[in-house]
Amino acid sequence: MTVKNQRPVCSVETSRGIRITVQSQYVKSHDYPLPGKFLFVYDVLIENVGDTFAQLDSRLWKIVNAHGEVEIITGPGVVGKFPALNPGQSFTYQSFCPLDTEWGTMEGHFVFQREDQSTFKAAVKRFVLADVSG
C-alpha cells in the first residue's frame, strides 16, 4: 500500500483542554483487498493542552460518503488503547477508512474521563476524505 504524495486534509478542534488534530490522505493501491473501494488513512494527534489529567474511554465516528449515506462507528478506546494524558502529554495513532465513493467526510468525538470520574466529549471537527493531489 502506498500513500500518494499530496497535501493532507486537516481538522483541528480543542474541547475542555484536549486538542484533536486529524490529517487524512487518499491511498492509491492496487493491492487493497476490497474492489470498488477508495481507501483513506488518517493520522490522529490527541494533545492534553489543559491543566487536568484525562483518559480516553471511547470514540464515535460519523462517516458520510458522497451519496450522503451515513455510517456511525462507536467503540471503546482507539486502536485497542486507552491513552491516559497528563497536561502536556500527547498520543498519536493511525487508522483507515474504506469508502465506496471517491470522497466523503468524517467527524465525531472521543469520550474522556477525569480523575474525579467525570466524563466529557472532545469533538473531532469534520474533515474531508478525498484525493487532493490534483
Image (cartoon, rainbow, N blue to C red):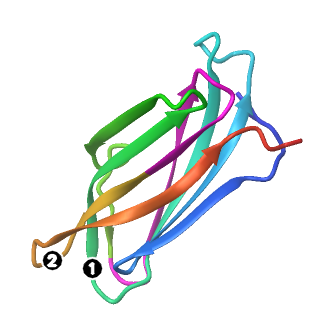
- SS category of the residue bearing label 2: loop
Residue most extreme to the top: 35
Residue under label 2, please give it. 115
Q: Which residues are magenta?
A: 86-107
Q: Main secondary structure of the magenta part?
A: strand
Q: Residue at 38% across / 85% down in the picture?
A: 50
Front residue of this view, candidates 128 and 81: 128
Q: Residue at 29% across / 56% down in the picture?
A: 82
Which amino acid type corresponds to the residue marked 1 in the rendered image?
A: Phe
When the figure is inspected, residue 42 is found, relative to residue 45, above or below; the finding is: above
Residue under label 1, please give it. 53
Q: Residue at 35% across / 37% down in the picture?
A: 73
- Position in image of residue 134 (x %, y %): 89, 41
Front residue of this view, candidates 77 and 40: 40
**Figure quadrant of residue 98:** top right
- SS category of the residue bearing label 1: loop
- Position in image of residue 30 (x %, y %): 74, 16
Horizontal side of 29 relative to 77 (left or right) equals right
Which amino acid type corresponds to the residue marked 2 in the rendered image?
A: Glu
